[in-house]
Amino acid sequence: QVQLVESGGGLVQAGGSLRLSCAASGRRFSINDMGWYRQAPGKQRELVAVITSGSSTNYADSVKGRFTISRDNAKNTVYLQMNSLKPEDTAAYYCNANVVVPGNPYGMDYWGKGTLVTVSS
């Protein structure tokens, strides 16, 4: 079992910055991809950014050039630096980790409980 705990959300004015963190803990695990998703009220959850174990990254078009995902494999932690925030970035942000499962090529996904980001205009 792996637990993911997010932190760093809050209220910020448009144009401001926030940094989200997500730490994974548990017994004897290895992580493949880690990512951030978000869900705004009345909308479906969407991918924001993902980073592989080798630190390759992919971003949603809406955040390219403004958000940066990074990870510290030694700490099993993923970060999301969010700059030039817009009101439309307001959402609950969820951390995701795909954990290695021996014999399962797809691994197993774990989710954090989410952290709220509110961007005021």
Image (cartoon, helix red, strand yellow):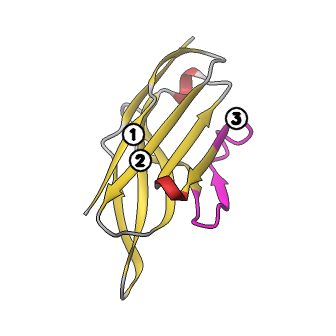
Q: Nearer the viewer, mark 1 or mark 3?
A: 1
Secondary structure at numbered mark 1: strand
Secondary element under disc 3, as helix, strand or loop, is loop
Residue 18 lies, with reference to residue 32, above or below; the image says above
In the picture, which quadrant includes the C terminus?
top right
**x, y percent for residue 35:** 50, 53
Q: Which residue is mark 1?
A: 6
Instruction: Decide: is 36 above or below 41.
Output: below
Label whose residue precedes the other's in the sequence (1 or 2): 1
Horizontal relation, residue 116 to residue 52: left or right: left
Q: Percent from the top left, x then y, of residue 108?
A: 35, 70
Determine whether, in the image, residue 60 is placed left or right of residue 44: right
Pinpoint residue 103: horizontal percent, then vertical percent. Answer: 36, 88
Q: Is residue 47 magenta?
A: no
Q: Taking 7 as reference, is 54 left or right?
A: right
Residue plotted at (25% across, 63% down): 1
Measuring from the top left, give residue 3's x and y in whole percent. Answer: 29, 53
Q: Secondary structure at mark 2?
A: strand
Q: Please tell me how crowded label 2 is: few (under 14), some (14-19), or many (20+) other residues with Cα within 10 Å.
A: some
Q: Is residue 62 found inside the magenta-colored segment of the image?
A: yes
Q: Which mark is residue 23?
A: 2
Q: What residue is shown with label 3?
A: 66
Q: Which residues are magenta?
A: 51-68
